[in-house]
Image (tube, rainbow, N blue to C red):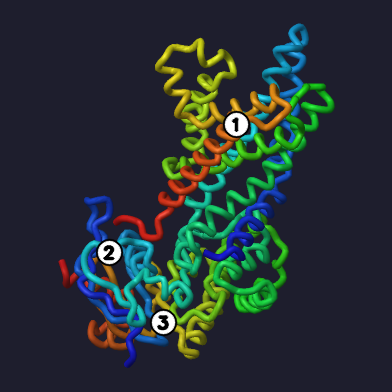
Amino acid sequence: MAIAIVIKNLSVTLGGQVKALKNVSIEIPVGKTTGVIGPSGAGKTTLIRAIVGRLQIPAGAIVIFDQLAGSPELRSTVTYMTQELSVYPDLTVKENLIYFARMSGQSVPDSKATVARVLETVDMSDKTNSLINDLSGGQKQRVSLAIALIGSPKLMVLDEPTVGLDPVLRDKLWKLFAKLASQGTTLVISSHSMDEAQRCDDLVLIRDGKVIAHSSPKELLERTQTKSVEQSFLKLVGGTK
Amino acid sequence: MSPLKTIATSGRVLKQLKHDPRTLALLFVIPPVLMTILKYVFSGEPRTFDSLAPMLLGIFPMVMMFLITSIATLRERRSGTLDRLMTMPVSKLDFILGYALAFSLVAVLQATITSFVMLRLLDVSVLGGTIATVIGAVLSALLGTALGLFTSAFATSEFQAVQFMPAIIFPQLLVCGLFVARTQMARPLQWLADVLPLTYSVDAMKQVTTHSNWTYLHTRDLIVVVGFTLVALMLGSITIRRQEKA
């Protein structure tokens, strides 16, 4: 199995006090959806920010496609959807997407074609000329996801991409994630929703900055002899106490 | 660095302004209105207004651009958009210069409108001519933009960003020679004025007002303003970190 991301002995202390990640070592496979699952404050966003290179790594290492996290070479191949919306609320959907497409290096004609494609993907074609400020929370979330779809990323790192979305759209997006993975894109998706975990190919369960399990959902359920990821999580947490 | 990305950034900033007609109105209407009010404040002393007005033209653009840029950049830092941009193939200079370019275009328009009102409607006489007046005002606006970009790094909310105005701009206003000739101020304040950029912006406007030819002092003052602008832009660029400390 080809490996996209190798994380070795990663420890991060935020503000010199809070140990957000404690000696994390995992390998994330190519062309799979890997869910980073855990409750709020578990260290998911810190791990995500370290992977995309936005956080200095004080201890340990992250290697992505044979490059250190944060390397300039990765900026064209890795896309990032932050937990905040990360869009310009006073611009239209189209203006936002064209700007980010241009900043990713696309020409004006290419960026226009990209806008049509990614809006179609997130089912927002009818809102092309709407101001972000006039959209609902879920629609804003979809625009933010559309930005992460710009270009042909080898790795997409999505921090809580389905928060605030209705079940129908969530289902649609998880199908999209599976389709992207089948086409060879590696996806790292953080979520605090245990329901969504079962839709991932690969799971990293995280709590208090520690990885408490890393396997496929099926292996996890077999190993813990439970029927859901939530039950597995609770069993593992009980076991680690 | 890519000029196309710089242009894309300035285009995006200008589009944001276009969607905000209230801010545009404030940018272009407030300076001429204030200038007009001042004329009537000094209706009994027209000579005082004639000497103050060009100096104010060196101050208004800086103050307004400082405020707008510091808040716009702070929003960028806080909303996650800068976070996203810093993971993309974008250089920090593309971002900084994009802002500087957008606001300098706004400054040209603002300075042109205010200069027109001052020179044509309020009959202020400036020996140096309209072009020299507009150049001074635009450079002053660019200085405000650069200072705003830099100081936004030290604010964590828009409330704090606004508080930087009395902290960064007001001291410069007090000692720049607008209210009292600098030679009449206490010596330490003269030294302070010598190292603050607004002093040179105001001095450049004084040169434009009183000299029909381009003087050495005028050139020196503008070079100092440009120098401060470049340093502030450079410092602003340093405050934008590709990787944040844990």
Q: In this rendering, does residue A139 appear at all?
A: no
Residue holding disc 3: A33
Question: Do callouts 3 and 1 point to residues on the same chain?
Answer: no
Tell me what residue is drawn at x 77 percent, y 10 percent.
Answer: B43
* Viewer-nearest of discs 3 and 2: 2
Q: Measured along the vertical axis of the image, is residue B17 above or below residue A92?
A: above
Label 1 with label 2: CB-CB less than 8 Å:
no
Q: In the drawing, does residue B155 fall left or right of residue B45?
A: left
Callout 2 amino acid:
Ile
Give SS at disc 3.
strand
* Viewer-nearest of discs 1 and 2: 1
Q: Which mark is residue A57?
A: 2
Label 3 with label 1: CB-CB less than 8 Å:
no
Give SS at disc 1.
helix
Question: Do callouts 3 and 2 point to residues on the same chain?
Answer: yes
Nearest to the observer: residue A166 or residue A46: A46
Callout 1 amino acid:
Tyr
Q: Measure how far apart labels 1 and 2 are at the Cα level.
A: 52 Å
Q: Residue furthest top?
A: B44
- Chain label for disc 2: A
Residue holding disc 1: B216
Q: Which mark is residue A71?
A: none
Tell me what residue is drawn at x 42 percent, y 75 percent.
Answer: A74
Give SS at disc 2.
loop
Q: Measure how far apart labels 3 and 1 are at the Cα level.
A: 66 Å
Quadrant housing residue A190: bottom left
- Chain label for disc 1: B
